[in-house]
């Protein structure tokens, strides 16, 4: 008996019971795109850290035993997708997971969740940033925002990037290993842009009209669509445009329903439109 007759993605991220982010977003999005999502929790939150208070349980010490059971089942994955990793130890566990489970047809997608708005997250240190750069070397696709792209490339953050400079930034990250890079959430006046780079090709911008305010979980939605589409063989350009358009629609629906910013985007209202 084999457990490998359906396409599968191993999603390594934290789990928040409320607030629409991380695994709680990845599970339905990847499933809607007809790929089985197999989660590996790195930590458990009652609700994400954007709320005034939350319950938190670190899952690091349980991850290896959890993963070992998958080895015993001889599971194979078409994709491996990583999100927020809270320590150097967790990054090492993920590196070992990739070494164990990556096959010739496995696509590795790393969302290097390290910071935003030009600031690194308080949980990240020089050591964890260095470890993340090592993890990125094993990726086929990376989806950093502009802050994270600067951290990976060890460049100073600023907001006004020319297209030529974005090309150099993406190319520098690609030289670390990934064949495809998309730098997300670049504000350009009334637009939000994603800069896409595929090794050996000229980079390009995909822009959508900016609506509302940034909400929790949009990066997780984006990475989930990119990951599932990569496994399904969807063109990278088409996939980035799909993810951008879907997130915009979800934000518009959230505004319409007066959803608090902390509660993320109500993608459930539009999930059946995702193809």
Image: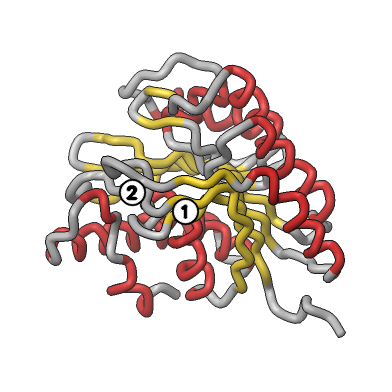
Q: Earlier in the sequence, mark 1 or mark 2?
A: 1
* Res. 260 image quadrant: bottom left
The x and y percentages for residue 216 are: 33, 48
* Res. 249 image quadrant: bottom left
Figure check: 85 above or below 233: above
Residue sitting at the far bottom? 1
Using residue 185 as the reference point, say whether residue 45 is left or right of it.
right
Q: Which residue is drawn at 83% across and 70% down?
A: 73
Q: Which of 86 and 242 is in front in this view?
A: 86
Q: Which residue is drawn at 37% across and 74% down?
A: 271
* Crowding near the residue tagged with mark 2, few <14, some 14–19, many ≥20 C-alpha atoms within 10 Å: some
Q: Is mark 2 on a helix, strand or loop?
A: loop
Residue sitting at the far top? 156
Q: Residue at x 67, y 55 (%)?
A: 80
Q: Residue at x 34, y 63 (%)?
A: 246
Q: What element carries label 1?
A: loop
Q: Distance between the residues labelled 1 and 2?
A: 9 Å
Figure check: 151 above or below 201: above
Instruction: Identify the mark at residue 22; answer none if there is no mark.
Output: 1
Q: Name the residue under label 2.
A: 216
Using residue 172 as the reference point, say whether residue 272 is left or right of it.
left
Q: Do the residues labelled 1 and 2 touch (CB within 8 Å)?
A: no
């Amino acid at each position: 008996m084999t457990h490998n007759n359906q396409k599968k993605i191993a999603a390594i991220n934290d789990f928040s019971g409320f607030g629409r982010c991380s695994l709680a977003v990845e599970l339905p999005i990847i499933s809607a795109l007809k790929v089985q999502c197999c989660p590996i929790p790195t930590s458990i939150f009652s609700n994400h850290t954007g709320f005034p208070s939350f319950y938190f349980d670190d899952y690091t010490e349980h991850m290896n035993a959890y993963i070992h059971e998958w080895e015993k089942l001889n599971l194979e994955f078409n994709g491996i997708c990583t999100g927020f990793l809270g320590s150097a130890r967790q990054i090492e566990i993920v590196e070992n997971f990739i070494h164990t489970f990556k096959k010739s047809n496995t696509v590795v997608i790393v969302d290097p969740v390290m910071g935003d708005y030009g600031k690194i997250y308080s949980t990240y240190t020089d050591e964890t940033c260095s470890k993340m750069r090592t993890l990125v070397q094993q990726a086929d696709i990376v989806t950093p925002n502009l802050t994270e792209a600067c951290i990976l490339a060890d460049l100073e953050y600023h907001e006004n990037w020319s297209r030529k400079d974005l090309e150099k930034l993406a190319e520098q990250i690609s030289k670390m290993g990934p064949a495809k890079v998309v730098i997300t959430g670049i504000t350009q006046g009334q637009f939000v842009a994603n800069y896409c780079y595929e090794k050996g090709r000229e980079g390009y911008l995909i822009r959508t009209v900016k609506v509302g305010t940034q909400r929790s979980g949009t990066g997780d939605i984006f990475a989930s669509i990119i990951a599932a589409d990569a496994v399904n063989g969807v063109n990278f350009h088409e996939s980035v445009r799909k993810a951008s358009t879907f997130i915009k629609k979800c934000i518009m629906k959230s505004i319409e329903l007066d959803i608090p910013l902390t509660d993320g985007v109500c993608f459930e209202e539009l999930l059946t439109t995702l193809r």
